[in-house]
Image: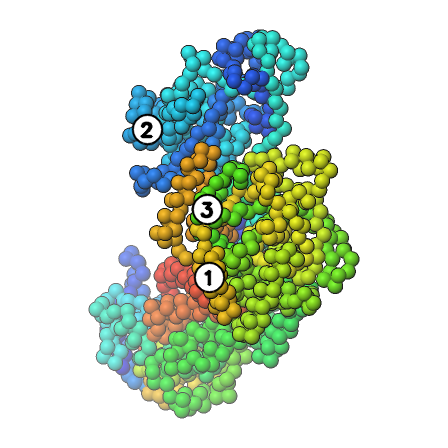
Amino acid sequence: MLIINKLKKSFSASEKPLLNNLELTLNSAESVSIQGASGCGKSTLLSLIAGFDRPDSGDILIDNLSITERKNKAHDIDGFRKNKLGIVFQSFNLFDCFNAWDNIAFTARLKGNYDKGYQQALMQQLGIVALSKKPLSQLSGGEQQRCAIARALVHRPSLVLADEPTGNLDETTSESVADLLYQTCKNTNTALVVVTHSSDVAKRADRVMRLHKGVLENAGSNDSFVSSTL
Amino acid sequence: MRTLLLTTLALFAMAKKRPWEPLLIIFAIVLANAGLVTVLLINEGATQGELLQNKQNLLTNSLVTPSDKAVNFTKEQYSLLRRSGFTQLIAFTTRDITLTCSSEKNEAQETKKHSTITLLGIDSQPFLGSRMRGFSVPDMSLLQNSMSTSQAPSKNNTRIFSPKPSNSQRSASDTFDAFAVNGLLHPATSAKLNCHNHHVPPQIESAEGKETQLFWPANIATNATNLVPQDTLVIPIEDFYKGSINVNDGQFPLAGVIALTALNTQDISDIEAILGISVSVTTSGATNETGSLPDSFRLNLWAMSALMGVVALFIVLNALNLMYRTRLPNIIRFRQLGISSAILTSALFTELLLYCLISIPIGMFLGFQAATLLSPVISGTFTSLFNAVFVNPDVNLLSLFGLALFVTFLSLALFALVPVTKLSKALTVNRVKKTKGASLLFVLTSTLFTLLLLFAVEQVVASTASALFFVALLLLSSCVLVLLWLPIIAKALTSIMPKRWPVFYYVIANMHSLSGKTRLAVCAFFIALTANIGMNTMTDSFRNATEQWLTQRLYAPFYLYTNQPLSKVKLLSSMTTTPLLKVEGKVIGVAGNEGGSISRVDAPTKISISSYPVHDTGKKALVLDSVLKTVSSTVSGSMSGSVSGSVSGLAPNSEKGTSPQNRLEGDKALNSVWRKFVNGEGVFINQQLAYKHDITLGDTLAISSITLRQSETSDNAALNAQIAQAGSEVSSTVFSTMPKWKVLGIYPDYGNLNGQVLVPLPFFATQDDVIKNALYSGVMAIYPTAKTDKPEAKSAEKNKERSGDISDGLSMPLNSNDAKFKAQVEKVLDAQPQMRGKYTLYAKQNLLDISMQTFDRTFVLTDGLNITTLLVAGIAFAVSLTVLTLGSAAQLSVLRALGVSQIKVKFALFMQYMLLCFMSALLAVPFGIYLAYVFINLVNRYAFNWTYPLAINAQVIVSSVGLSLLIVSLVLLLPLGKLKPKIDLRQEVQL
């Protein structure tokens, strides 16, 4: 589903590359969590996968489509994001002008595969059906993040990227939201990349990886990783 | 103090971090001050111009001339006088010259504008090196420059008149080359001679029965000064005697000498003794004819300035609100750290004061520039419309800055007091609450209530001040309604917008929330656009009414304008003439139509009593707003219940919506009224008089103090005195039969500020030439002896009238026959020596064109300010939205992250803003039309005492709305073009 080959990225020529020949392969319905110290390049990696930025070298293939090829024009990348990608932001980033339902439906309508029944079912899974008509200002942080997860999945993307999805939530809500995120992706056969500082969130992934010195390493058990990074 | 300083510095650091909002505040203050300073300078220029006009000039002093008119002073005599100690005497000589303005595009064409002015040559040497009688030396020294620069005029001139003599003229005296002369003109004359190419053609002078040609080919560089009388060009005397001016044996005859200081009897005796001849000393107390700038014009300027001020205030407040919204978290941190509310308030006001201090000098500079740029237009308008002078004002910069700072800061502080106090007291961020919009029922009820309130207040408007208050109330209440309706319309649009277009759906839905954040900017834009639509509709209505009224009133194909006495105007029998006769009088009382006693008016009103022809063409041309229905059933009270229309058909005011029966009834009433008018049973009065004293149809006027007018050419005061001395009333002398002063009809009289009464022409005494000449206004209608004057044609005309057919034979265009007729009239007039070159013959269309050009010039300034206000509001609206866009960059980046292309984001934003603008514009249309109605029927009614029909022209409204949308869209293109929302995963969208 997602194949990253020898990915290199640096922000200045004099410094060491932030990502150095990074490699990763991810299958459909598989999830991976990426941890690492602050500034190690976790968010940069997500930005490169999402096509927000271009790598210095290397390749990123999603469903066999390279998003790093120079010949790709801006609107190709926009199309890729619209059709293949779902994003869950740390600060939810929902539109305040819409209610919960319309916020979630936005990506499906954008892609053109809006399916009311599917959205209903998805919201059912996430436990937010009752919030459909509520304006955003009346939703709690956890409810908003669940809406954001639904928005990231409703248009049936191949890959969901989640950047600190529980960063703004309390511990209990975090666990609940993380469970839902992993579970729903699994149910919808969607690959998931989660960048997080939370070991509780990370350990729920199929694979837990650590970004260190520009490459991804298997982190082993969550407890050993946490103790090694502290 | 330290805390205040630290807090203020922290606020500036915030401003540096987010510079757009402070920049918007500065921008709005700059614009408001630029507008304020421009209007202040225009008013100051006008006031100083009026003062200058009242000041003395060269010819207001004693003039010493030989008693024997056949004798001239000589250069030697003048020299002798000065050597004898009469250094206050300045030699002068004079003659008339005609300057011809030729078109640069077609110089060969001889149809040119002639301006006859007096050429006054004076000895300018004595003015050098001393200050005399308040005449500034620099003014006079400018005359001297030509002596040193024999061929080239001085560079600091305001205008150059160049001679372009034809070959034939040149052959008359080709030994003279063009020479350079420096001259002085009065500012008003300078403005009147608004032509870049003037030349001095040969002057035909009659000397001892022999016509000689003068050739005076001068390049005259002029400077404007109030020292010079109007319509006079002052030059050095040595330049006066250049060219082919004949002098007798080098004697250089002088017309006389000007005494710059008062001469006593001893001085005069000494002068006579020195010269050996008898002299006359005339002291003229006359000053320049002082034009006055109507208060209405000042009112207009101030109203437009106030409008711009209000618009700017809304913009500043909008920017302040946006700025404070983003600063709220930081301000709360200050409070939480222990900074008191008072310190915070002081710091916020200090910041505001600094913005004022930065912006006001820039605004003042722009205001000065704008006033300088507008000066030529203003000067031309003042001169042509009000005979007033506009000068570049001399103002105290420091006091102007102080005034601007005081007004700006005070108004800002007052309006910002509530948000600043609220902000400085905040200790916690309240959970963002979804403000529940007003329900449709509430909005509908409020709208109904507001409209009823406006209707009720409109009924009690009874003065100019209350009319202007009503305008303010209308604008403010319409603003409230717009704020109520905008979210409802946006919500309605959201509900009808198909959701399958998510980006557009987002645009509409987001616009709904934007309407709350931009409400003050929307108000500014709405007020400016409403005022624009109102003003344009009012002007357009006025223009239409004036044009139609003039077209109908100008009943003759030609009009003769001359200063010559009426008895000297001789035309052929095939040319029918109708002179316009005028006297002055005062309305001292009005008797009600019930036949009661005369009630005296508060203050007697000076009116002009004009003649009106009683022939068929005059009847057809009469436009009446309302007429008396019958003698027994007079229409009392308001004019609305009376019959409207012109005598021969329908006036432009009432053409539409009249049923055939009403028309017939109207025609009957009109014909009946006309018969009474012709028989002297009553008069017609203009709207101005009717409104001023609440005169209704059937009322009888009490008119006294009927006197002959003072004209430029005749001194009728002497004649008035003679009549009075003879023991007879002037009124019985000027009227052959005294008409009854009963009001039969009220007619529109656009542009006239004074009351007027129309009396049938035959009632004026026209047998006595002296009285006839004194009555003559200088205007005469000329037309070929009409076919309708023949009995058979009259009968056909009557048949037409009975059948209701409207004949408008007078509005025919100038055809070849008319041109032939005009040539005939000119030939007849030119054959008379007393008339040659002393008349102007206008075709009806020429007069109409000139009137409409004057009309358009009147509104140049208003239009300019109006468009500027719209431009300011449009720019500010766009800038406010741009600032808001910068604030919502996170939302845009989310859109981009979700796969919406950059171009789509930009287009979506553009559509969003344009839609908001369009909705405001849609709401501005009905209020703009209502405002136009208020301008016409309330402001105009009480400020000028006349009204006219409101004409709603879709083209005018569409152009106003289109212009506003164009301004906003153009202004938006730049920031939107540069907008590149960055995608940042960690960016936080603020709710």
x, y percent for residue B792: 46, 61
**Spatial CA span between label 2 and label 1:** 54 Å
Give whichever of B281, B816 is nearer the camera: B816
**Residue pointed to by mark 2:** B169
**Residue pointed to by mark 1:** B792
Q: Is residue B192 visible?
A: yes
Q: Earlier in the sequence, mark 3 or mark 2?
A: 2
Dots 3, 2 in contact, CB < 8 A? no
Left or right position of B561 against B757: left
Q: Are marks 3 and 1 on the same chain?
A: yes
x, y percent for residue B438: 59, 76
Q: Residues within 10 Å of mark 3 (few under 14, many from 20)?
A: few
Q: Chain of mark 3?
A: B
Q: Residue at x 29, y 56 (%)?
A: A14
Q: Secondary structure at mark 3?
A: loop
**Residue pointed to by mark 3:** B573
Q: Secondary structure at mark 2?
A: helix
Give whichever of B873, B333 is nearer the camera: B873
Q: Earlier in the sequence, mark 2 or mark 1?
A: 2
Three-letter amino acid code of the residue under disc 3: Ser
Q: Earlier in the sequence, mark 3 or mark 1?
A: 3
**Spatial CA span between label 3 and label 1:** 20 Å
Give whichever of A73, B171 is nearer the camera: B171
Q: Residue at x 62, y 77 (%)?
A: B445
Residue B937 against residue B68 in the figure, above or below: below
**Spatial CA span between label 3 and label 2:** 37 Å
Q: Chain of mark 1?
A: B
